[in-house]
Amino acid sequence: MSEALSPAESTSSRKVHEFFLDNGLQVIVIPDHRAPVVTQMLWYKVGSADDPKGVSGLAHFVEHLMFKGTEANPPGQFAKVLARNGGEFNAFTRNDVTAYFERVAKDRLPTVMALEADRMSNLRFSADEVKSERDVVLEERRSRVENTPAAILQERMMSALFPGHPYGIPVIGWYEEIEGFSPEAAVEFYKRYYAPNNAVLVIAGDVTPDEVKALAEEHFGDIPASETLEPVRVRPVTAAPSEPVVIHVADPRAGRITVQRYFPVPSYPSAKPGEAEAIDLLMRIVTGGAAGKLYRRLVVEEKLAATAGGGYVRPLRDTGMLAFDAIAAEGASAEQLEEALTRFLAELRDGNISEADLTRAKSSYLAQFVYAADSQDELAAHYGGFLSAGLTLDQIEAWPERIDNVTVADIGKVAATYLDPARSVTGILEPSAETLAA
Amino acid sequence: MDIQRITSPGGITAYLVEHHDNPLISLRFAFRGGSAQDPDDKGGLAYFVTGMLDEGAGDMDAASFQEREQELAIRMDFNAARDLITCSYQTLTARKDEAFDLLKTVLTEPRFDEDATERVKGQILAGLKLDQNNPVNVASRAWSELAFQGHPYSRPIKGSFETVPGITAADLKSYADRVFARDNLIVVAVGDIDAETLAKDLDHIFGGLPEKAQLTPVPDAKLATGPIREIVEMDIPQSIVQFGLKGIMRADPDFLPAYVLNYIIGGGGFNSRLMEEVRVKRGLAYSVNSSLFPFQHAAVFMGRVATKNEAVAESLSVIKQELSRIAEAGPTEDELEDAKRYLTGAYALRFDSSSSIANQLLFLEVEGLGVDYVHERNDLIEAVTLEDVKRVAHRMLDADRLITTIVGKPVAAEADPALGEMA
């Protein structure tokens, strides 16, 4: 077997820079001079977990509305300008963050900075645009959720995993609450959260820190900080399920039996030192592709699953989750698959990770940093995602070292603590008797 | 960007772009053939082969091989397309020699063990079962079957319940023996490796392959004559509609104007005609788009729209209307200028990571364009005139001849005679 990969072998030679504007905007610069291209990513520290009660989906809705125009850039202008400049753009909303990104030739950076700065403070909300965009979001929900039994099940599982915490409410929102969206609610949300002191600007590509500093001052420097922002985002204390929850969904559209199990765990920002890293490596050993122990057991040895995997959902600010999932093999029942999963997790909890397992997982993990460094998008997402979830730049840079320091004992400890069946949510999706075809 | 053409001592050629600021090497290579080489009764064979290449090689069974992959932290991904098998193979510089050794074993000594074959077959069949209830997949399969009747392109790449169960380890080996050869191989390397080292490594990795592939000749396909429409009933709230026409082949001088035209029609996201008319103006759909697919033996212009069942008829009517408008009058001068500005400005974005650079260069070679095209391409796009796109719009967009598949429970679509005969 090869020697373990060292943190040194998994670092690129590029250096990441950080500075803050007076109005609170945090700016990160990641130089990459291989191509005259630049990626801008603006992360607002607001997400669906900040939706007001009864108005779920509002953060996601405001993301949609961010494309609907300002005084200087009327509806459609944003897309036109990007197109005119050969740029790509998109946005997404998650539980704790909403991010907007553009990729352009490097000399167009001032243009896209100007656009983001403009819509950070000058967004306009017309009643017509709000109504028609509401219909679009309903259509989106229909295509992502209502058309998909697996997504329906997932919504119910998240509800059960995080009872009383907003992570248990879908990012896109509940159907009836989307229908109730008003321009007033959107405006209030926007004014509160869309401000420089609530954002992280990441610029990756063919730029220097000095260039970016000058541009950031020019375009974002005059935007005032938000004063209605809560000093710390107030979230309910997380309750976890206290006894196992099992949810069955039978649907004619489900092709195969699938079994999933979720556990609540600390996240990188909320964990004790070293804990999240240990959890991360545990999951790599267990659910890391075909070499993962779960796949090995359920698919190869017991032949009860056609495929099996999972992961550690990160980054989340308040708390995280582990997911284990499997699609049943032909002829295997949900009960058999579930029982095998339970047995596997119980053994894991008792501790069966070896030094060799850990070394292999560390190499694979550290290598990921090299792979990520190949792509501006991935770098911007990595830094932006974790900074906006509450980590510092130093913490992010020291990651390879912290991964390298994890021991087999650390892994054993998190497995014993967090793979507690009493705190799990299981979802079983089965094809129901009727078929879909006419 | 400096693109070198390397020839190994053994005569294998490759393109190389060197970057030494990140310790990563990306190889991207392809074998011509793809799923079009599947025997008629063994649809899904090429796809199955690609699923087996990490299930053992040389003296490693599946478990040992997968552990080795993880240990070396390599990223290996094979893909079967209609006319090609492609592979993306990435390794850290620190693991290069062992990684390339592993790749050589994969290509020259694949195993196709019985238990691994059964397991992967089970996974493919599980995937087919899931696809069966995925309206996007169903629409796509139905469309290919309808449009390419009697030609290998009508067969789904992943195969079907009729064909996959009968595929044996011997079939898999036979495919690999026939297709993995040196005369149908195309290779690109990007990253932390120099020309001299690469040349030696090329012979090491690929030198042991047979010199000549044994490909079955594939005829050119003739697309079915529209209008034809097929409805596949599925009890879902939102229908998926796939619509298409004969397109333009890559080597046709009209291809680039068609490419620009497609951007205007439905390739440009929010800047496209279809998006404007269907989503922005009428709120009818969350997504509507179009693409050009130039295969080796056929070319297709195809689009898709997802909309609630009650809005299918209206959406299709709007799409048809828009295509006819463009066929008649062509795009506007402004639309053409905007499209050209976008396409030329965005080209650089395709070259910003090792894997994306490797991918671009691979496909230039596959399409016979040569890597100098990288420097010529924007000028060629700039040279497209309004006359060109009008001519191509008229040539290609015969909206009365649409081939359409609809999956869902479309309301009142039956009532529209303009949508053509039911298949």
Image (cartoon, coloured by chain):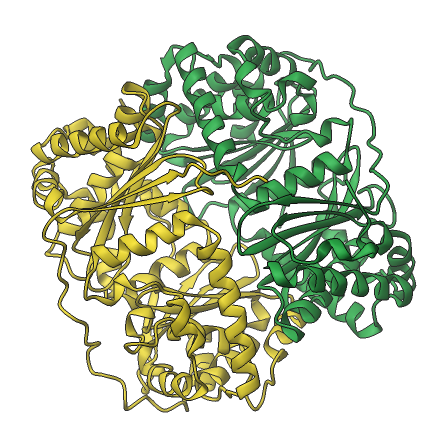
Chain colours: A yellow, B green
Name the image quarter holding residue B38.
Answer: top right
Q: Is residue A5 visible?
A: no
Which residue is nearer to you in this view: A183 or A355?
Answer: A183
- Locate residue A69, reporting x and y percent: 56, 83
Q: Is residue B35 above or below residue A374?
A: above
Which residue is nearer to you in this view: A398 or A272?
Answer: A272
- Locate residue A386, reporting x and y percent: 29, 62
Name the image quarter holding residue B14.
Answer: top right
Q: Is residue A361 visible?
A: yes
- Residue at the top extreme of this rendering: B170
Direction from residue A10 to residue A431 in the image, left or right = right
- Locate residue A304, reporting x and y percent: 31, 24
Q: Is residue A30 above or below residue B409?
A: below
Query: Residue at point 45% right, 86% down?
Result: A183
Q: Is residue A335 above or below residue B167?
A: below
Query: Residue at point 49% right, 83% down?
Result: A119
Direction from residue B87 to residue A420 in the image, left or right = left
Quadrant of the image for the N terminus of chain A?
top left
Q: Is residue B359 above or below residue A226?
A: above
Quadrant of the image for the C terminus of chain A?
top right
Count of picture labels: 0
Which residue is nearer to you in this view: B180 or A129?
Answer: A129
Query: Residue at point 27% right, 20% down?
Result: A302
- Locate residue B163, reporting x and y percent: 59, 20
